[in-house]
Image (spheres, grey):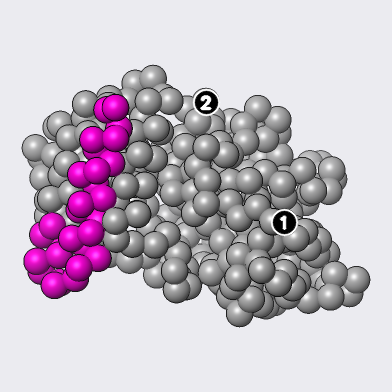
Amino acid sequence: MPVPHKLAFVVATKDRPEELRRLWQSLTVQTRRPDEVVIVDASARPVPPADPREARPRLRHIPTPVASATRQRNMGLDAVDPDMSLVGFLDDDAVLEAGAVEEMLRFWAQAGPDVAGSAFNMANHPPLDFPLLKRTRLVAALGLYSGDGGRVTASGFQTMIGPVDATVWTDWLPSGASVWRREVFAASRFDEWFDGYSYLEDLDFSYRVGRRAKLAVVAPARYLHLPAAGGRGEGYAFGVREVLNRTYFVAKHDGLSLGKCRAALTLRLLMSLAAAIRERKASQAARAFGNAVGLVRSVL
């Protein structure tokens, strides 16, 4: 008879005490609690959401001066108890439905050795931006985007996944609410080149793993993403980051095209300009300018 899995979650956080307490509360009321939670806290005043001496599930709270999602997750991996066979990641602004962990472990109890990772099903996934454009045959034929969820196209752009009505297999997984077989981390860690907010670090990590194993989104394991203020940022700085991080990702992986990537990023620039006109938001115009600067820097 197979030995039941033990599950630990790693949470990277910074200056979000209310969101962290809300996430912790959702973990304490699970019909099947995780076995361990490791919080790597880069807050100015790091405070655990509960007393680690009394917390259930078991809680490890690790303060760090380094505010980088990739670095914090890698630190958390090093701190996870060796008995854990599954390791998951949760963003601090996620909230799991009460039966989510139980449903996820039910999936893993039946998963074959060719399955490496899975994601929880985001029940409140935001609508796709510019859906008519992204789903045109021309855009798909050029490899810039795809109408199929969970794909990574030749341009290095990933398509959105959820919510899903049935469990699906994908090319990539978002890291904000995901679970991985422990052995995966012997060969793959998060690339700490993606620093700070670490935009696209989950695409890079999951795509690497997914090229040699199977990835799934588990439909009945549901959660809500309730984005906190700040997040990835906006405007010029994000416009530059989304270009440089995307081209870095594409350059790392054989089979992806920098030419198609830059074409898709040019389309992204035009979409930001259109959004600036439509919404009358200066931040979208600044994002488009950041895209332009990023495209120039990406070829220097």
Q: Position of residue 78 (x, y in %)?
A: 77, 43
Residue bearing the label numbered 1: 64
Q: Looking at the image, which residue is at 18% across and 60% down?
A: 285
Judge the density around disc 2: few (<14), some (14-19), many (≥20) Cα neighbours within 10 Å: few
Left or right of 180 in this view: 167: left
The residue at 41%/37% (across/down) is 171
For the C terminus, give its image quadrant: top left
Tell me which amino acid carries mark 2.
Arg
Instruction: Farthest residue to the top: give it.
Output: 254
Give how far across and how far down residue 227 sits, in percent.
45, 70
Callout in the foreground (2, 1): 1
Gap in angstroms between the C-alphas marked 2 and 1: 33 Å
* Image position of 276 with respect to 17: above or below: above
Which stretch is magenta?
273-300
Q: Residue placed at 33% from the left, 66% from the top? A: 126
Q: Which residue is disc 2 drawn over?
A: 212
Q: Is residue 182 above or below residue 290?
A: above
Q: Amino acid at mark 1?
A: Thr
